[in-house]
Amino acid sequence: MTLLYNKYCENLTQFEEIAELVISQIQNGVRIFFVQGKMGSGKTTLIHFILKKIGINQLLSSPTYGYLNTYNSPWGDLIHADLYRIDDIDQLFDIGFFEYVDKNNIMFIEWPNLVEEVDFGTKLYINLYIESDQRRVELRLII
């Protein structure tokens, strides 16, 4: 495990710096991103910063109720998955989650608890913490 980033964010503009670092990991071949943090910690907001930095300018929404949103990126399909409302692994098969993985798509997965033990190969953990009214972001690469 390699720590790539660990900083407190004074404001949301620092998400742009994090987005650039995440994009560099996409360019290096990372395809799976586990985005973790408590409700309201900024998971979806950070993913939207990343998508906009990539150049995805269409209307962005949270996939909480649809589970998966698909966007076209310069590297192929980019999937934003929100597994908060998924209760078991069978539901992931029902929504076609693993078909997206099998196609080597770029996937940002919020609430990845159910799939943490799945061998995706290299993945980047994006952890957001709220500590004493401050937001801390940590990026850890698992190879």
Image (tube, helix red, strand yellow):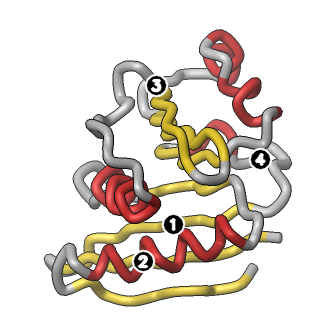
User: Which labelled disc corresponds to residue 117?
Assistant: 4
Q: Residues within 10 Å of mark 3 (few under 14, many from 20)?
A: many
Left or right of 20? Residue 105 is: right
Classify 103 as above or below 20: above
Q: Nearer the viewer, mark 1 or mark 2?
A: 2
Q: Residues within 10 Å of mark 1 (few under 14, many from 20)?
A: many
Q: Which amino acid type is marked by label 4?
A: Glu
Residue that mark 3 sits on: 67
The percent coordinates of residue 37 (x first, y second) are 39, 58
Q: Nearer the viewer, mark 4 or mark 3?
A: 3
Q: Are marks 3 and 2 in contact (CB under 8 Å)?
A: no
Q: Secondary structure at mark 2?
A: helix
Label 3, label 2: how far apart the Cα atoms are:
24 Å
Label 1, label 4: how far apart the Cα atoms are:
16 Å
Classify 67 as above or below 117: above
Q: Which amino acid type is marked by label 1?
A: Ile
Q: Earlier in the sequence, mark 1 or mark 4?
A: 4
Left or right of 20? Residue 75 is: right
Q: Earlier in the sequence, mark 4 or mark 3?
A: 3
Towards the viewer: 128 or 59: 59
Label 1, label 2: how far apart the Cα atoms are:
10 Å
